[in-house]
Image (tube, helix red, strand yellow):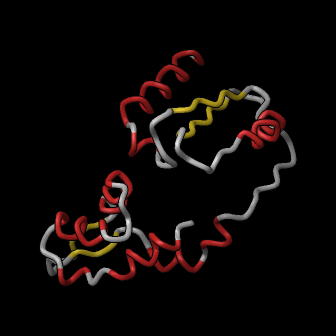
């Protein structure tokens, strides 16, 4: 699912850009969601010569993407409170996952922020903050 993003990031010749706005416009051709582009652009920095460069190690992420997506097989359930936040427009956490989440995190809560995608914190930062704050306050 992230191939489009990797292709877009690798397709940028960062030395050709003078502003983040220009990079955003270039990314918009293949990544229509502004919130996703803004999230990605936060990973830009300038080098000593003043050119843009990625703060993240894009090659390592790309070359190890399959390993990053492997299922983690826990040996025991996590028995303390846990919060899962999912976007209502995301397909990462499905209804079919609920049983497995409860098995591995028996004291968990799943909160859905309806108008957000996978990157809930970028799509709906205020709502995300409130859900986390409410959860933490209930734990104290």
Q: Nearer the viewer, residue 139 or 58?
A: 58
113 relative to 30 in the view: left or right: right
68 relative to 42 in the view: left or right: right
Q: Nearer the viewer, residue 140 or 99?
A: 99
The image quadrant that residue 15 belongs to is bottom left
115 relative to 96 in the view: left or right: left
Q: Measured along the vertical axis of the image, is residue 89 above or below residue 41?
A: above
Q: Position of residue 11 (x, y in %)?
A: 36, 82
Q: Is residue 78 visible?
A: no
Q: Is residue 73 visible?
A: yes
- Seen at 57% across and 66% down, the residue is 1
- Seen at 44% across and 33% down, the residue is 128
Q: Position of residue 84 (x, y in %)?
A: 62, 36
- Seen at 76% across and 59% down, the residue is 71
Q: Measured along the vertical axis of the image, is residue 107 above or below residue 4?
A: above
Count up the numbered dots: 0
11 relative to 58 in the view: left or right: left
Q: Position of residue 75 (x, y in %)?
A: 87, 48
Q: Position of residue 42 (x, y in %)?
A: 31, 58
The image quadrant where one finds the C terminus is top right
The image quadrant that residue 18 belongs to is bottom left
């Amino acid at each position: 699912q992230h191939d489009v993003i990797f292709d877009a990031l690798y397709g940028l010749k960062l030395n050709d850009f003078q502003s983040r706005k220009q990079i955003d416009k270039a990314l918009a051709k293949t990544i229509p969601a502004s919130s996703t582009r803004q999230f990605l652009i936060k990973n830009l920095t300038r080098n000593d010569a003043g050119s843009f460069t990625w703060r993240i190690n894009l090659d390592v992420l790309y070359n190890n993407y399959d390993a990053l997506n492997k299922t983690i097989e826990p040996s025991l359930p996590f028995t303390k409170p846990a919060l899962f936040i999912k976007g209502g427009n995301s397909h990462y956490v499905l209804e079919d996952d609920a049983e497995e989440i409860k098995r591995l995190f028996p004291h968990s809560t799943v909160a859905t922020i309806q108008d957000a995608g996978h990157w809930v914190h970028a799509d709906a930062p205020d709502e995300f903050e409130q859900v986390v704050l409410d959860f933490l306050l209930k734990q104290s």
